[in-house]
Image (cartoon, rainbow, N blue to C red):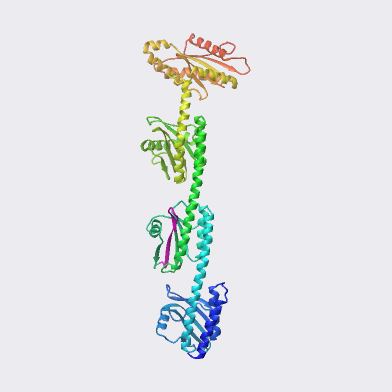
Amino acid sequence: MDTLERQIIFKLKSRFFDIIDTENGFFHYEKLLDEMLSAIKTLTGAEEIILYGCNEWKQDFFVKASTSDQASAVPPVISLNGLKAWVRESRELRIAGIENQGEELILPLMKGDLLLGCMILKGGLDSFRFLPENILHELSGECAQFLDKAHGLAKIVSEEKRYKQLYRVTEKFHSSMDMDRVLGEIIYTLQEVYPTFTYYLLLSQDNNSHGDLPIRDLEYDSENIAAMQAYVTGSVQFEDSIQEKRSVLYAPLKGKQGVYGVLQVIAPNTLMFPKNEVEFITLLANTAGSALENAQLYQQSKRLITDLQLINETSHRLNSNLRLTETMTFMSEQIVRSFDAEEAGFILISPEGVNSNVINGSTSFFHTKNADPYIRYIKEKIIKERESLFIGDFSLQNQEPISYFKSIMAVPMTQSGALKGFALVMHRSPYHFSFETFKLLQSLIHHSTLAFTNSMLREELEKMVVTDHLTKLYSRSYLDDRIHQSMNEDHEGTFMLIDIDDFKAINDTYGHQVGDDVIIQVANVINGNIRGTDVGARWGGEELAVYLPAVSLAAGTIIAERLVKKVFESSNPRVTISCGVSYWSRGRKDSYPALFKRADRALYTAKHSGKNKAVIESAKNSFI
């Protein structure tokens, strides 16, 4: 190589060194390529230079840089494989001019046996005559070496940028305990680093509340084998498709306690996933997995605290001597509010399992006929299996009404091994309740059953104290208390004394057991024809009494006559009753003993004027 040739190569190397040295640490790969082409253009006198990269997958060239803004994207007339063969054969690099339009040089850029691309130098006729063939080969080698080093520097700068980004993302991940923010940051980072890639987060947990993020459920099927392998093994998996011209990476989102999903990254137009990207994506996935784990554990701890507060508050309220109806109302309201339920009911089951009874305080739906199919179905399942039920898409087959409620949770209420009943919680939407909600309901009912049982026992004992054992009517002392209370609080009231006619003859004819049964029959007629606020009581022997608070004399008279008629029609053996009715109203001077005496005199009149009738006595002792 003569002195001129050496000077040319020396100038080129010096210019290449200056290009990199003058950047002062601020590196732009595209600018570096433009500077390289400018230096070659100045050195060779070329009118235009185009730098082509090569795509091994597509087997063609693409423009990477050019000295002209109007550079054609049309690749060289020679193919990629043809250029490789040209280099191996050491053929001349000159391309003859066409019809006096100029001359072109093609400079292949090789690193060993690897083709990096090529440069096309364009000029006028005989523009490159002063550049001998060996200089062209030397020029080609120096440009290839510079391009390789520039690419290496670009890779280093890119890696530094990405790892700084990873550090920034890591700080953001661990500064937030919100699951949605962590997932959003993962997607944002991928968009920023890999704008041409496609990616999805395949999560193993519920992901219905993450907006428009590219998130899917992680499901096992024939199309998700690689994703499931990544999830199960906790290691990166690859899936290459020549037909679809893409490569897919599956990186597990892995924390210390488990794998929470899989990051799917799709690289288009790639035979194999770029190795230099695998490490970064894996680190990003591991960082994201740890952040997801921390966010999930934080949310679980918050949910656990809330659940414990709910159970503690409920237990405290239930142990505060509330009445049974108040207890069940409070529980229904708690469940509807805390579990976002539409209906909450509590159903008692008889010891033999035949009968069921909705406890007052359940939501209103359970007091309608539409609730019967649900109660009947769940009761049979609870009695048979003695296990809680968690149903996401419930349907009543061949039953009416149509199944409106799809999400159902049912928890048996047991005390000392005995089944007392069950709690039933429902919502119209399918799969509305989470499994965590179901576990919380189980815990809540378990802690509350003792309070339910105690409340029921307390009210049963209270009722036993004020209830006649034979007739299940109230005792006389309870009747006295209620009449005194009514005369202090109400504006009026009606009282009646009832006596079974010829009761001694019943005992003498049929025996005392039948006599007791007759008393029970009359008591049942009374209970079946008065309100829940009215008081039916056993006065003594075959004498019974009824008090109707806030009821007028006219209304009380109708009820008395109805009782007389019903007893005559329904009793077996056939019996009749006599009834004496008295009445009080506010503004009149009156008393309980006077009220009783008037009713007693009216009863006496009824007994001695034919029986099987109701007689009413006014406050002035005149008969009506």
At which x and y percent is residue 63?
Answer: 50, 76
Residue 89 visible in the shown view: yes
Frontmost residue, 513 versus 219: 219
Q: State the image quarter where residue 493 is shown.
A: top right
Farthest residue to the right: give it. 587
Q: Residue at x 43, y 73 (%)?
A: 58
Figure quadrant of residue 522:
top left
Q: Please determine whether, in this image, residue 17 is positioned above or below residue 388.
A: below
Q: Position of residue 22 (x, y in %)?
A: 57, 77
**Would you place residue 600 above or below residue 410 in this image?**
above
Query: What are the residue bounds of the magenta stretch?
Result: 244-262
Residue at position x 36%, y 38% in the image: 385
* 64 relative to 488, above or below: below
Q: Residue 557: x percent and y percent?
A: 53, 18
Q: Is residue 339 visible?
A: no
Position of the C terminus, as image quadrant, is top right
Q: How would you classify the magenta stretch by its main secondary structure?
A: strand
Q: Is residue 260 magenta?
A: yes
Residue 380 placement: quadrant: top left
430 relative position to 621: left or right: left
Query: Which residue is depicted at the point 44% across and 54% down?
Result: 256
Rendering coords of residue 590 (x, y %): 60, 14
Count every numbered label the image shows and give the total.
Answer: 0
Q: Residue at x 50, y 60 (%)?
A: 187
State the residue in front, 64 or 470: 64
